[in-house]
Amino acid sequence: MAQLLFLAGLYAVGVMFGLLFKHQLPVVLIASTGFLWGALIWVSGGLILLTASIPYTPLSMFLLMIGLGVGLGLIHVRNKTWQLSRTELKELLPIVLIVLLGLILAGMYNFSIASTDSIIYIIAGRRIAYEGFSSGVVKELSLRGVFLPELQSASVFLGMDYLYALQPMFLLSFVLVNFSLCKRIISHILADDRLAWQLSVLGNLIYFSTYFIVFQAFYIHNSMISAVYLFLAVGGFWLAAKEKNQGWMTIGILALLGFSLARTEAPLFAIILLALVVSSGQFSYRILLRSTLPYLFSLTAWYLYLLGRMGEGTYILDPARTLVIIGTLVSFSLLVLLSEQQWIKRLVVPHLPKFMIGSILLLLVFQFIQNPDHMALSFWNTVKNLLYSGRWGITWLMALLLVMIVAGGPRVSREYLFYYGISSFFSLLLAISYFRVPYRLGWGDSANRMSTHILPIILMFILMKIAQALSGAVFMKRSPLTDGEENR
Amino acid sequence: MGVIVLHIGGFYVVILSIVIALMIKLQKRFWIVFGTVMFPILTGAYVIYNLVSFPEINQAHRSNLERLPSNELIALRDGSVGAFWPEWIYSFIDIYYQGKTLLIPDNIVNSLDLTQEELQTQGRLSDVSFIEFDGLLSEADAELLLLLESADITLDDGVEYHLITEIRDPASPLLLLRYQRQLYFIPQDLLLEIRGIL
């Protein structure tokens, strides 16, 4: 019961936070993402207390959440966002009911699955609650990211062994977010709302009927968490560009923060996405500064903290690699800061995706020359996992087939960004294997699990292409942004 | 591997040939047919395939979707794959014995992989003391203790930990006892009771 109240509390705080953007964002999305914001707030709050050496106790976290709730309440009163119209309530309540029902079911039926990593996450979480960021705990965090241990640490406060309803809640949020974002995005391409709805349902069915996705709804790990935040970030940025709406940009950046805290190497993938955002030319200098710099600075501060505390580090993140991540974050911050300079604006920004994929490919060539057996093993094991040994069934065959078919169809707005993003993701995934043991065969392999992050984005791209093809044929709905973009 | 590649290649050639043939035949209408007919059919077939193959994939592996017998960490661990790390013992000690006093007999101290400091910091025991006591169990004792309610953990090196979870008197200190490669955490009062039986 304590677990359910805690998770429901996170959802309530998240919805309360989301409603601050009520005038900019659909209420359906606010209700769908409530749990994600609640979880991110808990993790960020815990991080602030722990890095500031304030005792991390049930009382301090309770006071922090209460303080935050009061603060949010005051902002709601000032902005008059606390009042919900009948229509908004009609949109909000069904989703709240679905979430509560899901929560009750997740609390009743414990189907949790664990690997060695899962137990480490849980135990690291328990140690956070007792020891704070002791050197032993920081070592674990530098291996596996802070997001999940920080959430699991609440189990100690609640008098439980671990939070088993947590992972299913992320899957439920993912289903809701996937559906609402896909529908919103497709509605921008297709005038026919019914067709947009049907396509979104089909997209959801492809993703959520996959065995490995359902499996991960109960597997205590960060894959599902990373996947939902990354998907939300990509969707948020796309909609921010399309609707010229700052609210979506904020959603995108916050989701990217959630993604970046889930795994230690995640900021490198996040930078790929941010590079695409910057190079799209869709955002003003002011918006880029206001959105990306707080994210980049807070993440840099976190990695500096890790650097100062990690000692020799671990086989995944040692001081040298931490410095690479910090260097990447600082360099990107500088790029954003200087992006208004004429020569950067003209010569660098538009070609960022090409520089990015070019650099990663060069790195891969170097890595294959340096250690061909290691890299070839990682490559083939990843391919084999996606095709038959990673518990994906025929998912990747299906996705590849659909991509091959729709690639020949009418282009969607800034389609090249998707191609760059997806190919950069896989290239970087392979490149990072050079710095660790090669990827192995089996579902538990890192690359196999991390493929969960990119699959929903590929599926969304397929849906967009199909929607574009249909819109070009009969249901054309043109907007100023898509005009003239289709054939770029 | 070769056979799989052949099957996949064949599947792709067939599907893509159909798609290309339809593209040529239908020309501009192809995308309407694809979006409204082919894509839903492909998705439907895919979902049916997933539903049918779900139990097979699930049962083919040890780590699968199955309701756990309890919400305790030990039940999660028992159903999981991978090695059990020796340092995890401390967290289990925390779960079952937080705040208790542990008495370690002098004659087994040297054979332990556990440290006094971590038993207190991670195991959350209020006190860890060494006592003059024979900590070695007889086979009969060990067999009897195994009948008690316990959380049992076996490490990769064969060392077994048995954390007796039956608590009669919450104030009773814990004893750490040994029989060959088995280590038993047991409340002192329970041991006295059992020895009384013996």
Image (spheres, helix red, strand yellow):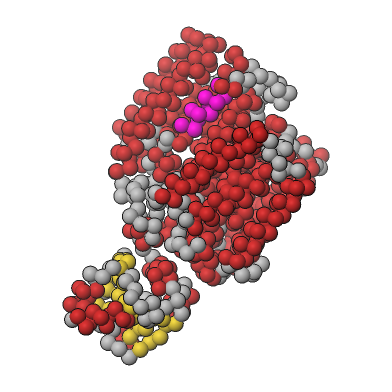
Q: Residue at x 62, y 66 (%)?
A: A60
Question: Which range of residues does the magenta coloring cover?
Answer: A195-205
User: Residue B54 placed where, x, y %?
Assistant: 34, 37
On screen, residue A110 above or below A394: below
Confirm whether the magenta stretch covers residue A415: no
User: Residue A247 placed where, x, y %?
Assistant: 71, 40
Q: Residue furthest front?
A: A86
Q: Quadrant of residue B165?
A: bottom left
Q: Does any portion of residue A321 appear in the rendered image?
A: yes
* Residue placed most toward the observer, A358 or B52: B52
Q: Quadrant of residue A145?
A: bottom right
Q: Residue at x 59, y 22 (%)?
A: A193
User: Residue B67 placed where, x, y %?
Assistant: 35, 49
* Residue placed most toward the observer, A330 or A250: A250
* Residue placed most toward the observer, A384 or A239: A239
Report the quarter where the C terminus of chain B lies: bottom left
Q: Residue furthest bottom?
A: B132
User: Residue A376 placed where, x, y %?
Assistant: 43, 45
**How many numbered markers are drawn?**
0
Q: Residue at x 65, y 59 (%)?
A: A66
Q: Residue furthest right?
A: A342
Q: Is residue A341 left or right of residue B147?
A: right
Q: Quadrant of residue A176?
A: top right
